[in-house]
Every structure is written in C-alpha cells, then in structure tokens.
Amino acid sequence: MRISDTIQDSIVDGPGLRYVIFTQGCPHRCPGCHNPGTHDPEGGREVEPELLIKQMLSNPLTDGLTLSGGEPFYQAAALVPIAEAARAHRLNVWAWSGWTFEELMEEGDPDKLALLRLCDVLVDGRFVLAKRTLELKWRGSSNQRVLDVKKSLESGRATLYTPPPTGLEAFAVPL
Ligand code: SF4
C-alpha cells in the first residue's frame, strides 16, 4: 500500500494516544485541503501493511489506530488487516473519509464496507472551504460529522458519536 506518513504518538487524531496512518492518494481534491501532498496516488511511499502493524503494536501505551489521509477508503483492502490487528489488540479504530457514510453504503464496495465495519468512529464528508471551522473537534468544516459506526450500521442511518463521560464535560470543545 502507499502511505504519506505515520505518527506513533498523536494526541490530536482521536481520543488518547494514537498510532496514525496517513494514506497516500485522494480522489476528492477538496479546495483548501490541508494536505494536498497526499492527493497523488503514485506519491508517498510504498509500505507493507505488516510493517505498519508491527509499528502500531510496538508501543503498549497506544489507545487506538487512526486512519487518515489522503483517503483511507481508497486503499481499504490493504487497511483491513491493519484494522483487524488493532481490534485484536483492543485498540479502537477511528477513520476519516471524504466519502460520507451514505456514499460508502450506497456504493457497497466490499472492501470499503469491510473496513467500515472495523471502525468505531467515522469522521465523514469532504472538506468544504466555505464551512471551514476551528471550533469543532476533529473536523475541518461544519458539514463533516463524527459518527458512531456500530450504531450507524445497526440502524442503517448515520448516527452521531457520543464520547464516553469523562467528568470534564464543562471544559470540552463541542462536538
Ligand atoms: S478528502 Fe481530505 S485529503 Fe482528500 S482532498 Fe479532501 S480534505 Fe484533502
């Protein structure tokens, strides 16, 4: 698979300490994209998924895996074993996609759906420059949604994610 980069100890790409894979290649080309260097599917570098799994599991303090990009669902088949390994080691899985939950469901691509089923949370939708915001946690524009994947799949409708209570809600940035 092709990746742009990895981060082994992110605290901004989802809750807790996270192993982040920035995949290479994105078909959406959103104007104002924060990461245009990830668009070219031939860019970045080739890497074996097994190597990423090894790196992901090398830190026992890691809480979760984040799949970002680029467009992670563009290389869904390669990401499935990585997400499976994460879940097998009790790491939660968050993914960002320019495709919405409805678009992924409607397309019905088996690899994309397999990856979606392995995710706990999907932050969905393209970045829309006119709706850009710095106010919302985990999102770049207000059209994007933070979805609970399990509930969304069970109900067949995009369902917003509710973070577990921390006792610090009064200080939290709104979702
Ligand atoms: S989906 Fe993300 S990476 Fe792709 S063009 Fe849009 S903002 Fe950039």
Image: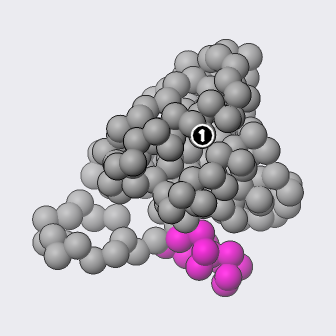
Q: How is the image coloured?
A: one colour
Q: Is residue 165 left or right of residue 74?
A: left
Asked whether residue 76 is drawn in magenta, I would say no
Q: Is residue 149 above or below residue 73?
A: below
Q: Amino acid at mark 1?
A: Ile
Among the 4 quarters of the image, the one containing residue 104 = bottom right
Residue 88: percent from the left, percent from the top? 60, 60
Residue 53: percent from the left, percent from the top? 60, 40
Which residues, given as a range, are shown in magenta?
Answer: 148-160
Among the 4 quarters of the image, the one containing residue 174 = bottom left
Q: Residue at x 57, y 23 (%)?
A: 4
Q: Residue at x 71, y 55 (%)?
A: 115
Residue on which disc 1 sits: 53
Q: Is residue 83 left or right of residue 143?
A: right
Q: Is residue 107 above or below residue 96?
A: below
Q: Classify mark 1: helix, strand or loop.
A: helix
Q: Is residue 26 left or right of residue 172?
A: right
Which residue sits furthest bottom?
155
Could you tell me which quadrant the C terminus lies in?
bottom left
Q: Is residue 128 left or right of residue 48?
A: left
Q: Is residue 89 visible?
A: yes
Residue 80: percent from the left, percent from the top? 72, 50
